Amino acid sequence: MPEEQITAIWREARVVPRALLDEDSRTQAALGLFRARDQAGLHRVRRTAADVSQSVLSSARKLDPVYRRPVTELLEPRYTVGASRWRNLPAASLAMALTARLAARSVPAFVSLAQAQRALWGDLARHAPDLVRIDIVLAELALAGAERAHLTERAARGPRPGEETVRGL
């Protein structure tokens, strides 16, 4: 058996676990979603994936820069305008994860968006639990990192008169 084939089989068997946020882990999780893309339980998610991603991006553009930047930096490169319905499924997963984490921070537009997406996200989680798990952690780390950077920067320069804060930060 050729070495490349052995390596591919070994990787697919996942004998050596990968880190949750390792790029190969998200790629493997997205591949699992791709394989499940035609299942009946994913039809509604597949049909609305582009709209979900676009809605989150549109709402994110109105956010304070502390949150706007991580949302757009994560989501824009993964969202493809006009792509086949299934191609935006991974972007929709990340969009719903970002929505959930912003809703948890009581960002008003995202609270209502999270409520509207709850059933879709449940469908996605049933068919692609690995991708949903990775994306929720990725979203939380990106937002928490942005908050931390904001606090560090603000502490270093001191608050400016009339400066807006992010949820009391």
Image (cartoon, helix red, strand yellow):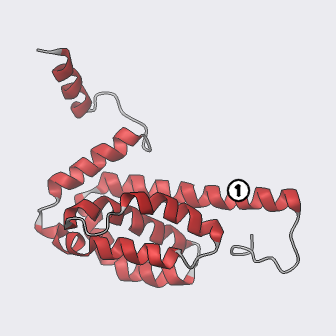
155 vs 109, left or right, is right
Residue 2, given in percent of the width and then of the height, sits at 14, 15
Circle 1: is it few (<14), some (14-19), or many (20+) Cα within 10 Å? few
Depth check: give the residue in front, 68 or 132. 68
Judging by the rendered image, the residue that carries numbered circle 1 is 149
Query: Which quarter of the image is occupied by the N terminus?
Result: top left
Q: Residue at x 69, y 75 (%)?
A: 167
94 vs 32, left or right, is right
Q: Residue at x 20, y 20 (%)?
A: 4
Depth check: give the residue in front, 101 or 5. 5
Quadrant hosting residue 119: bottom left
- For badge 1, the amino acid type reads Ala
Q: Residue at x 74, y 74 (%)?
A: 165
Q: Secondary structure at mark 1?
A: helix
Residue 66, given in percent of the width and then of the height, sits at 65, 67
Depth check: give the residue in front, 44 or 115. 44
105 vs 30, left or right, is right
Residue 111, given in percent of the width and then of the height, sits at 49, 81
